[in-house]
Image (spheres, coloured by chain):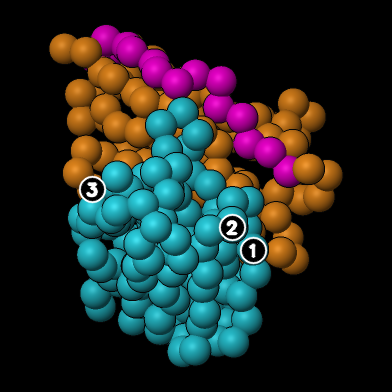
Chain colours: A orange, B cyan
Amino acid sequence: AQRVTQPEKLLSVFKGAPVELKCNYSYSGSPELFWYVQYSRQRLQLLLRHISRESIKGFTADLNKGETSFHLKKPFAQEEDSAMYYCALSTSGTYKYIFGTGTRLKVLA
Amino acid sequence: NAGVTQTPKFQVLKTGQSMTLQCAQDMNHEYMSWYRQDPGMGLRLIHYSVGAGITDQGEVPNGYNVSRSTTEDFPLRLLSAAPSQTSVYFCASSLGSPGNTIYFGEGSWLTVV
């Protein structure tokens, strides 16, 4: 069965420290992977997708098919990065998007 | 474009009552879906639709009905509300190809007492 695992419910880091939010997936096909972010009192929105291979707000994520991971990284965390982050998997042919349980990132001053 | 619009934003129901959460999108998206968001559970798919007249069950469909009579609208019906359905509900839409970006509504906070 398809699954997305985010092992950390809460991640606290100090401003300026590196951040890595972990995401592992289980899917036998070719995955489409995303990171969505929910800032306080805002709707969920796309942060980045693996197919774009771009950096958004300083965040990057690399798909590692060998380790079935799609970790989100940022070298220097900012206070405005504090939010809830969801990793999501889109499975080919089914139109379903499977979300992880989310990681709350708190960036401390 | 308004994007994805959900109503109501807040609702309190008594156990056994029924209600409909409305969802509309103006982006001509084929794919629409409903999720519920619970602490520690993340987002769980309730129902989804890949086009008008086509719906399918997600991970947690029990207690909910949907229909898709138009491309724009995708209402979620709670048939007989239960306290376990207290949650935040999100409607979402995307273009009708797997792997496209999902656009979310602002959420509907539902409390069943």
- Using a 10 Å C-alpha cutoff, classify the residue at mark 1 as few (fewer than 14 neighbours), some (14 to 19) or many (20 or more): some
Q: CA distance from mark 3 to mark 2?
A: 26 Å
Question: Could you say whether the residue bearing mark 1 is in a helix, strand or loop?
Answer: strand
Q: Quadrant of residue A81?
A: top left
- In this rendered view, identify the residue nearer to me: A4 or A62: A4
Q: Amino acid at mark 3?
A: Gln
> Residue at coordinates 32% horizontally, 11% vertically from top-left?
A13
Q: Chain of mark 3?
A: A
> Residue at coordinates 55% horizontally, 53% vertically from top-left?
B45
For marks 3 and 2, give the one nearer the viewer. 2
Q: Are marks 1 and 2 in contact (CB under 8 Å)?
A: yes
Q: Is residue B97 visible?
A: yes
Image quadrant occupied by the N terminus of chain B: bottom left
Q: Chain of mark 2?
A: B
> Residue at coordinates 40% horizontally, 81% vertically from top-left?
B73
Q: Which mark is residue A89?
A: none
For marks 3 and 1, give the one nearer the viewer. 1
Q: CA distance from mark 1 to mark 2?
A: 6 Å
Q: Which mark is residue B61?
A: 2
Q: Which mark is residue B57?
A: 1
From this view, report whether residue A109 is shown above or below residue B83: above
Q: Which residues are magenta?
A: A2-16
Q: Amino acid at mark 1?
A: Gln
Q: What residue sits right under mark 3 in the picture?
A: A42
Q: Chain of mark 1?
A: B
